[in-house]
Amino acid sequence: MQLTPDLLLKAYAIGIFPMAESRHDPELHWIDPEERGVLPFESFHIPRRLKRSLRRNLFEVRCDSAFADVVKACAEVTGDRPDTWINPVIEQLIGELYRMGFAHSVECWRDGQLVGGLYGISLGGAFFGESMFSREKDASKVALVHLVLRLQKGGFGLLDTQFTTDHLSQFGVIDIHRDDYRERLSRAISLRAKFPRQALPPEEIEAFIKSTK
């Protein structure tokens, strides 16, 4: 059976997602982890040093202005990442979801250059964070902070990070059991949320920084 964007959305809606073994592996594997990484909005944490970076306004933050470039950057092999799970099939499907309005990117720019960001899939009030990249210090972290603010502002109820890593744990990401995750997912998908793409005023960003732990 050929995987289509509609089938992909149905898979996310029941809690499974595809990954490739490597960048050049043409096959996809369905993942349904027993423990799922999620970032509860109420316990979102911004490290003190990152708060300083945010207040310095090092980057121009945009949404959905270079989606394909963000996905491509996330799929690139780097010194810290010798391989990736994003193969050309996933790139194509994610691109189609973006054109359908179900995928979004948060991007950090400096001097007209894309230097970091992330992308994910939105379905109802659930957002599935897929991948992030950084070419400058703190760029992907700043993108994550802006993502969380936008999700809260847009009425989302779930930020799924798929897995928990040391990098994500510093922001408050936790593991929950598959059954708990599916309950949260079901509630979130039923929400009528909208991803805010517009630029956010500095005072709103500052208020959000102050409100976090």
Image (cartoon, grey):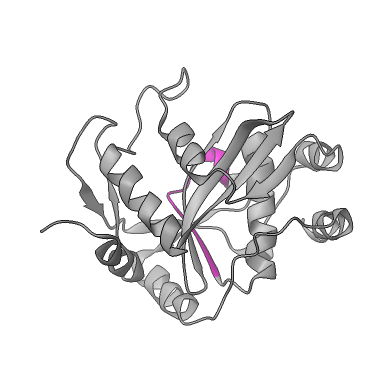
**How far across and how far down the image is residue 35, in percent?**
37, 57
Q: Using the rendered view, name the quadrant where residue 34 is placed.
A: bottom left
Kindly tell me whether residue 40 is visible in this rendering: yes
Q: Residue at x 63, y 30 (%)?
A: 115
Foreground residue among 52 and 101: 101
Quadrant (top left/top right/bottom left/bottom right) for the N terminus: bottom left
Number of labels in the image equals 0
- Position of residue 117 in the picture relative to residue 16 (left or right): right
**How far across and how far down the image is residue 122, in percent?**
48, 64
- Position of residue 148 in the picture relative to residue 12 (left or right): right
Kindly tell me whether residue 15 is visible in this rendering: no
Quick one: which residue is furthest to the left in this view?
1
Q: Residue at x 41, y 71 (%)?
A: 180
Foreground residue among 165 and 188: 188
- Position of residue 119 in the picture relative to residue 46 (left or right): left
* Range shown magenta: 158-168
**Residue 132 to residue 124: above or below:** above
Does the magenta segment cover residue 141?
A: no
**How far across and how far down the image is residue 169, in percent?**
57, 46
Q: Residue at x 73, y 48 (%)?
A: 46
Q: Residue at x 80, y 43 (%)?
A: 51
**How far across and how far down the image is residue 61, in percent?**
71, 45
